Image (cartoon, rainbow, N blue to C red):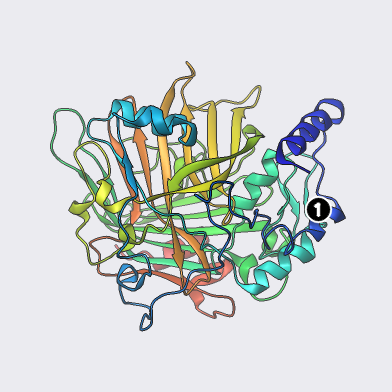
Amino acid sequence: MKFNQVVLCIAISTIFSGNVWSASPADVARLGQDLTAVGADPAANKDGTIPAFSGMDKPLPGWSFGKVREEYSKLKTEKPLFVIDASNVDKYADRLTPGQIQMLRQVKGYTMPVYETHRNCGVPDFVAKNTKAGALKSGIAKDGWSLESATLPGVPFPVPQSGIEVMWNWLARYQGVGVEYQDVYTDISPRAGSTSTLVTRLVIRSYFPWAQTGQHSPQDSQGLLSGFYYLYNEPAALAGQGTMQRYYFNRDSESWYYFTGQRRVRRLPLYAYDAPVIGNENQYPADTTYVFFGNPDRFDWKVVGKKEVYIPYNNFAIQNFSRKMEDAMGATSVASSVRRYELHRVWEIEGTVKAGMRHSAPKKTLYLDEDSWIVATGDDFDVQGKIWKAKENYITPEWDLGACFTSGSTYNDLTSGRYVLDNVVMGTGKDIKFYLPGTTDTKFKDSYYTGENLGAISDR
């Protein structure tokens, strides 16, 4: 069945039943045949500008953890095929998102260097097997948003039939059991009239209990989707303070904050959705992290369609921890020298705030890479329906993980002219570290991600 026919069927089903329905056995039988193990089209596009799926990327000989990945990438000598800028944006507009088009037209000097496409984002074999084994068992709960059943680690809905199913493919994507940033930057460009970049430096740990060896359900570990720990080292005003968070498959998140002045942990009951991220001058809300993160329950999500878009891909430069952070911070945008774009097929998803709910960005559009289910780019719209923020994740193959990951993110505010470069290891001398299934490290246990433990490990 062609994609536009699938979308039509979804629309008709929604109109008459209002229900979310899952894929059929015939759909699932296509996995590993005329679909890849995670549901992507394995074939090249008609003009060959998107190649056939090639499997997970491999490094050049000699790489091991701690060595700069960019130096061992097979793509390190590639040059851009062409560069999109304000003078030729109309030529490429059919393969750009509205946010990208506005960035090119509005932001002085903004360009998008486009490289040869490589479809080199895969998953480990056990994730592929769980995806096929669980595809007919995955389901959305009666509340219309929470993930009630799935076989994890795996892609819950490799042949998605609704926008919320696509969202869970992103939110429950395989990232290993744990991810550790031993040192990481979030930089925010200067406000109008200033030349000072706001620099935040911290330690981040994230935990995914369902990614351990075997098959797991969203009901395991009391429904825990992920745990996050943030320890601030810079600026001085935040040094020693920390945040602990727990996100769930089926209920509200929990957050705690350690205040050094009080030497106490306090619960943060409203630290989610469009609540401003602490220490960042209200430049982005909690659910803007990684373009979109957190409970998807305030929005109605629909599949707009599938299309070809220039998206960030194979962004080894942004993960080069030996580069200086200053190399990436341009006057009006992230420097093009550390950005790389390729043409890929994406799922376009639109989220509209539900009746009776509120959000500072009542409409969101997300574009997910078909091979990795990573949100590559996204646009936030304000209450007037104008594009407010153009956002992107830098998709990078992580050889030790066996899958692709977001090696950094950018959130461009088209109203204020400021931008955020988030979760980047450039300038730290330390790479992102992945903890794989089977790890026994105590930093990646359920009990670590609690308010009680935040008090125990905070020492200022």
- In the shown orientation, is residue 191 left or right of residue 98? left
Q: Position of residue 8 (x, y in %)?
A: 77, 31
Query: In the displayed structure, would residue 392 be above or below residue 274?
Result: below
Q: How many marks?
A: 1
Q: Return the residue found at the far bottom.
A: 62
Q: Residue at x 45, y 20 (%)?
A: 386
**Horizontal arrangement in the rendering, residue 87 relative to residue 272 (left or right):** left
Residue in front for this viewpoint, 111 or 243: 111
Task: Please tell me in which quadrant of the rendered image residue 204 appears.
Answer: bottom left
Vertical side of 240 occupied by 144: above or below: above
Classify 10 Å Cα crowding around label 1: few (below 14), some (14-19), many (20 and above). Answer: some
Q: Residue at x 32, y 60 (%)?
A: 78
Q: In the figure, 320 relative to 60: above or below?
A: above
Q: Which residue is mark 1?
A: 27
Can residue 311 be seen here? The reply is: yes
Q: Is residue 279 visible?
A: no
Q: Provide residue 157's location: percent of width, then percent of height.
A: 72, 52
| Amino acid type of the residue that numbered disc 1 sits on in the rendered structure | Asp
Quadrant into which the C terminus falls? bottom left
Left or right position of 384 against 430? right
Residue at position x 35%, y 62% in the image: 316
The secondary structure type at the circle numbered 1 is: helix
Position of 194 relative to 63 (above/below): above
Residue 114: x, y in percent?
37, 47
Residue 96 drawn at (x, y percent) = 45, 35
Image quadrant containing the N terminus: top right
Extreme-front residue of the structure: 47
Q: Is residue 331 left or right of residue 7?
A: left
